[in-house]
Image: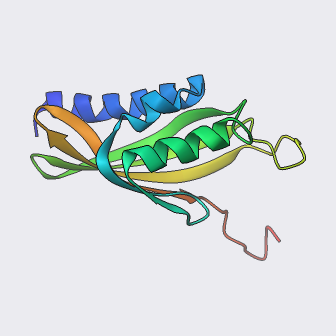
Amino acid sequence: MQSTDTAAVMAVMTSLIDAWNRHDMDAFANLFTEDADFVNVVGTRWIGRDAIGKAHAATHATIFKNSQLTLKDSSLRFLKSDIAVLRAVTEVTGQVDGAGRTLPPRDALLTLIMITIGKKWSIAVAQNTNIIPPVSPDNR
């Protein structure tokens, strides 16, 4: 794969984080294809750029109003020259619960399947999964 494709895919991730941290859900939604499919950490599924944008705008007006998203680690694999899978370990800080109490930082594994439309990389499928430390006899 060309390094320009790698850089372009990673630029989409950087733009996603930037839009989240600015709470600009229009910019966030515009990173997705028109018919994108997104599943969040609690299993709620939205289909379509508009639905993804509206759902994120609602949460950024409430529980994510002061949140910040950071990229901790990532891996990238090209399935074909125009299809990429990016797995990103992210951390969210500043999320609040329904009573307005700040929650502890939370790590998640965000899987993005991206495609090129013309020469532009866009997110076609997203799955966000909370990373829960395993329970063992030593950390109960």
Q: Looking at the image, can residue 95 be seen? A: yes
Residue 126 image offset from top left, x and y in percent: 40, 54
15 on left or right of 22: left
- Looking at the image, which is closer to me, 89 or 84? 84
Q: Position of residue 45 (x, y in %)?
A: 49, 62
Picture quarter with the C terminus = bottom right
Residue 90 seen? no
Question: From the viewer's perspective, is residue 12 above or below residue 48?
Answer: above
* In-image side of 127 versus 3 (left or right): right
Residue positioned most to the bottom: 137
Residue 134 image offset from top left, x and y in percent: 66, 69
Q: Is residue 2 left or right of residue 24?
A: left
Q: Is residue 106 above or below residue 10?
A: below
Badge count: 0
Q: Which residue is drawn at the image coordinates 15% and 27% (left, top)?
A: 4
The image quadrant where one finds the N terminus is top left
- Residue at 53% over, 26% down: 24
**Residue pictured at 74% horizontal, 42% vertical:** 63
Q: Position of residue 77 (x, y in %)?
A: 24, 50
Tell me what residue is drawn at x 49 percent, y 25 percent: 18
